[in-house]
């Protein structure tokens, strides 16, 4: 089913996710200036690279033993497609009243995704920022969907995710975060190298 929030044909700054995935698989060579010059494409490449590193061995082992349930992978790819879109403009305060500084909503979602993907056992599926991000000081709610490794403590991972998101947004974006809602949407098998004997 197509997500109505995704751009038409799932394009990311003129490129499909499949094109970006193929480019990444080729080691980003030869360099494509249209891709490398796009912040949205680079964010998608980084997210695809993290996903690839996390799932490669696990999916190969699943294929050898049983049909892989790649539904969670599809949900994460849908989240990446949505997250890298520029979205709304988030102003940044500056002492010079003539300065007009801003971040894109996509850049903020990429920050959230990077923080979550840096937590062992977590893969970020989708992020959403609700509220008036275009007005300095207006409260916003952050929603993050995550996939966790089987056997990991859900409550602890959700707490770490919330704390990391709050800290990262305080450091890089001038958002007044009212809540950070973390939902575990998928539980995936342990990667083979992490299985206990």
Image (spheres, rainbow, N blue to C red):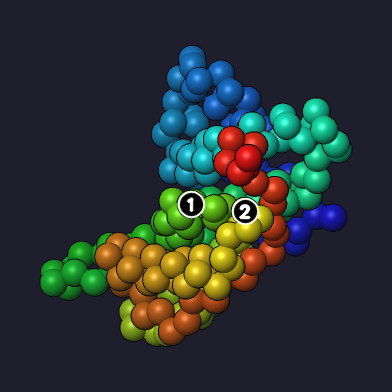
Which residue lies at the image location 58% right of the left edge and 23% below the top edge?
25
Residue 78: x %, y % from top left: 68, 51
Decide: is 40 above or below 142: above
**Residue wearing tag 1:** 120
Which callout, 1 or 2, points at the residue further toward the start of the chain? Answer: 1
Which residue lies at the image location 13% right of the left edge and 69% below the top edge?
96
Q: Disc number at residue 149? A: 2
Packing grade of label 1 (10 A; few <14, some 14-19, many >=20) is few
User: Residue lying furthest left in this view?
Assistant: 95
Decide: is 47 above or below 136: above
Decide: is 11 above or below 120: above
Residue 152: x %, y % from top left: 58, 60
Q: Quadrant of residue 62?
A: top right
Q: Quadrant of residue 24?
A: top right
Mark 1 element type: loop
Question: Can the viewer see residue 173 in this picture?
Answer: no
User: Residue lying furthest front in this view?
Assistant: 197
Report the quarter where the N terminus lies. Answer: bottom right
Which residue lies at the image location 45% right of the left edge and 20% below the top edge?
31
Answer with left or right where residue 127 lies relative to residue 77.
left
In front here: 24 or 68? 68
Q: How many labels, in total?
A: 2
Residue 191: x %, y % from top left: 63, 41
Residue 36: x %, y % from top left: 44, 31
In front here: 121 or 116? 121
Determine whether label 1 and label 2 are within 8 Å by CB.
no
In front here: 63 or 41? 63
Q: Quadrant of residue 115?
A: bottom left
Question: Can the viewer see residue 66 in this picture?
Answer: yes
Answer with left or right where residue 123 lies relative to residue 106.
right
Answer with left or right where residue 122 lies relative to residue 33.
right
């Amino acid at each position: 089913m197509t997500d109505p929030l995704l751009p038409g044909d799932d394009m990311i700054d003129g490129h499909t996710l499949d094109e970006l995935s193929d480019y990444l698989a080729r080691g980003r060579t030869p360099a494509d200036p249209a891709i490398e010059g796009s912040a949205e494409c680079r964010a998608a490449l980084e997210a695809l690279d993290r996903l690839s590193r996390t799932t490669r061995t696990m999916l190969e082992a699943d294929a050898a033993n049983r049909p892989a349930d790649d539904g969670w992978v599809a949900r994460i790819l849908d989240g990446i497609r949505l997250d890298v879109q520029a979205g709304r403009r988030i102003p940044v305060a500056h002492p010079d009243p003539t300065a007009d500084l801003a971040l894109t909503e996509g850049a903020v979602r990429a920050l959230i995704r990077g923080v979550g993907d840096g937590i062992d056992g977590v893969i970020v599926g989708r992020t959403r920022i609700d509220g008036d991000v275009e007005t300095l000081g207006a409260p916003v709610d952050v929603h993050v969907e995550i996939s966790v490794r089987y056997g990991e403590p859900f409550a602890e991972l959700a707490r770490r995710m919330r704390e990391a998101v709050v800290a990262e947004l305080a450091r890089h974006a001038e958002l007044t975060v009212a809540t950070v809602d973390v939902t575990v949407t998928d539980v995936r098998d342990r990667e083979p190298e992490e299985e206990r004997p």
